[in-house]
Amino acid sequence: MEETKLFLITYFAALLGVVPPGLVNMSVAKTCVQRGKKDGMFVAVGASIVVLFQALIAILLAKYIFNNPFVQNILLRTGLVIFILMMVYFFVMAQRKRKQVEVSDTTGAKSILKGMAVAALNIFPIPYFCAIGAALNVGGNVDYHIFQILIFILAASLGTFSTLYFYVIFFIRIEEKAVFFSKYSNYFMAILMLILVIITLFRIFY
C-alpha cells in the first residue's frame, strides 16, 4: 500500500512538474516541428532516462541537501552559470539567418543523446525531487529499502515521459506552423533562460 502511494504521488508530481514550458519540453517540441514526431519521441526517451539518475541522486541526497545550505547554494550557482551560457547560445542562434525548415529524420541514437544532454543541463529536477522525497519522508529518518528507491525513480521517469509524450502529440497537430515555430523558438528559449536566471538569482540571495 505504501509503495503504491509512493509511486502515484511521485508519478503525478513528476508529470505536473514538466507541464509548464521549460528547457526539456520545449526542446522536445522544437525537435518535433523540425525533424518530426519520431525524433521528438526519441528526445523524450533520452530525457526520461536522465531523470532516472536525477531522481536517484535527489532521493539519496535529500536529507543531506536540506540540512546543508552550502550544497544547496553550490547547486544553484552551478545552474545559474549554465542558464546564462544557454541564454547567450540561444540568442546568438536566433540572430543567425535561417532558411526554411525542412523536416528530416536523424538516427534514433542521436536524438536520444540530444534528449539526455538537454535533460542533464537542467538541474532543477534534483531539488524538485528532493522536495518530493522529503515530503514523502523517503529521505528523512525512515530507513528505506532499495525497492522504495526503485519505485521512486521509476515513477519520476514515467511521469516525465508522459508529459513529454503529450507535448509530442500536441505539437504534431500544429505541424503547418512548424516554420513559424522554428523561426522564433530560439528567441523563446533565450527568454526562458533569462527567466530561469532571474529565478535562480532570487533563490540564491533570498
Image (cartoon, rainbow, N blue to C red):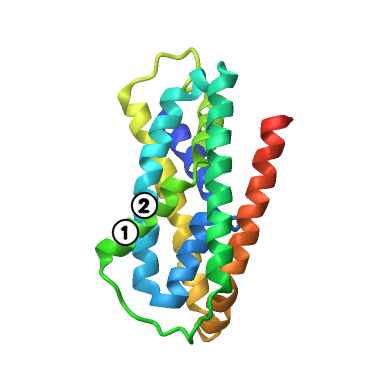
Q: Quadrant of the N terminus?
A: top left
Q: Residue at x 54, y 51 (%)?
A: 85
Instruction: Estimate the x, y position of residue 122 in percent, counting from the top left.
Output: 49, 46
Give the residue type that dot 2 points to: Met
Left or right: 36, with 14 as reference point: left
Instruction: Kindly identify which numbered label has been placed on residue 42.
Output: none
Q: Which residue is mark 1?
A: 112
Residue, far right: 206
9 vs 78, nearest the viewer: 78
Q: Which residue is mark 2?
A: 116
Instruction: Estimate the x, y position of residue 176 in percent, counting from the top left.
Output: 52, 86
| Secondary structure under the numbered disc 1 in the rendered image | helix
54 vs 152, nearest the viewer: 54
Q: Place residue 109 in its image quadrant.
A: bottom left
Q: Quadrant of the C terminus?
A: top right
Give the residue type that dot 1 points to: Ile
Tell me the CA gap for discs 2 and 1: 6 Å
169 vs 112, nearest the viewer: 112
Q: Residue at x 46, y 83 (%)?
A: 101
| Secondary structure under the numbered disc 2 in the rendered image | helix
Q: Are marks 2 and 1 in contact (CB under 8 Å)?
A: yes
Q: Place residue 57 in its image quadrant.
A: top left
Instruction: Estimate the x, y position of residue 195 in percent, counting from the top left.
Output: 67, 52
Q: Is residue 114 above or below residue 1?
A: below
Q: Place residue 55 in its image quadrant.
A: top left
Instruction: Estimate the x, y position of residue 49 in percent, counting from the top left.
Output: 34, 48
Q: Residue at x 41, y 38 (%)?
A: 54
Q: Residue at x 38, y 52 (%)?
A: 117
